[in-house]
Amino acid sequence: MGSYAVFGGAGGVGSALARSLTSNGQQVHLIGRNEDTLSRLAEEIGASYAVADATDSDAVEQALEQGPDELSGMAYAVGTIDLKPLRRVTAEDMRHAYEVNVIGALNAARSSRSRISEHGSMVLFSSVAAQKGFQNHTAIAAAKGAVDALTRQLAAEYAPKVRVNAIAMSLTETPLAASVLKSDAMRDGIAKSHALQRLGQPEDPAALARFLLSDESSWITGSILNVDGGRAALA
């Protein structure tokens, strides 16, 4: 049985991944900012949890100390959605997106590295917006582009002992995306922009994350893998 730290563990994708891992007999340590949602999920699936803001390196270290001494892997399922026209994007918008998506991922990777056993794995989450140009996506696209670069850099730094990969998602039905999917017309329009004609579900990227965390993906590192309904390649 393996042990995994899941940052953003009570979010849409993080909770789907945590459920998938525990249903397969793995031990999970949830880390996030909302104690109420973390504690409910931890009780439901038999996981441990700790409260921390991933942008605070000391808090991340303390949160990991509350979990297993040895980890098989770590997933950083934390992100932002701040969509607005370029003329309205502020420096603070850019800083916030970078801190949550990039600095938080770096903190999680650096602090968990010493706890991850040899041949372990890390999974970060990116976005199709880092690969294609979309209106209103300046802050998130730039931040997730940095996540792609960070993924490759961590993979180089931590090879051959720990693998590092990222999953590039398109819009997925999670609480984080609720503000973008407020109307049926909006949902339908976004769904039809994908080759597979539907929105992503949290279980879609979670399934790939579980594979990347497992030994079945033991010859994959430094990769950005798309779970996007075909949007990057076909839409």
Image (cartoon, rainbow, N blue to C red):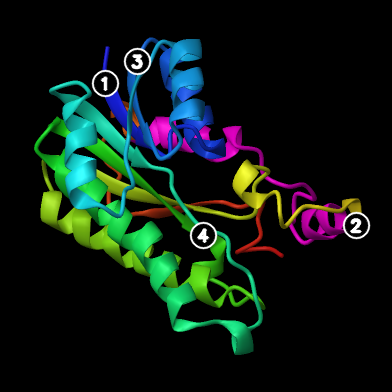
Secondary structure under the numbered disc 2 in the rendered image: helix
What span is in magenta? 185-212
**Above or below: residue 96 compared with residue 227:** below
Q: Which residue is mark 3?
A: 26
**Residue at the image position 21 percent from the left and 53 percent from the top:** 155
* Mark number, residue 3: 1
Q: Quadrant of residue 123?
A: top left
* Residue 6 sits inside the magenta stretch: no
**Residue at the image position 67 percent from the left and 78 percent from the top:** 135
Q: Is residue 170 visible?
A: yes
Answer with mark 4 or mark 2, whichever residue precedes in sequence: 4
Answer with mark 3 or mark 4, whichever residue precedes in sequence: 3
Answer with mark 3 or mark 1, whichever residue precedes in sequence: 1
**Residue at the image position 19 percent from the left and 21 percent from the top:** 68
Q: In x, y percent, where is residue 152?
A: 26, 60
Q: Quadrant of residue 5?
A: top left
Answer with mark 1 or mark 2, whichever residue precedes in sequence: 1
* Three-letter code, disc 4: Ser
* Three-letter code, disc 3: Gln
How many residues crowd around disc 4 within 10 Å: few (fewer than 14), some, or many (20 or more)? Answer: many
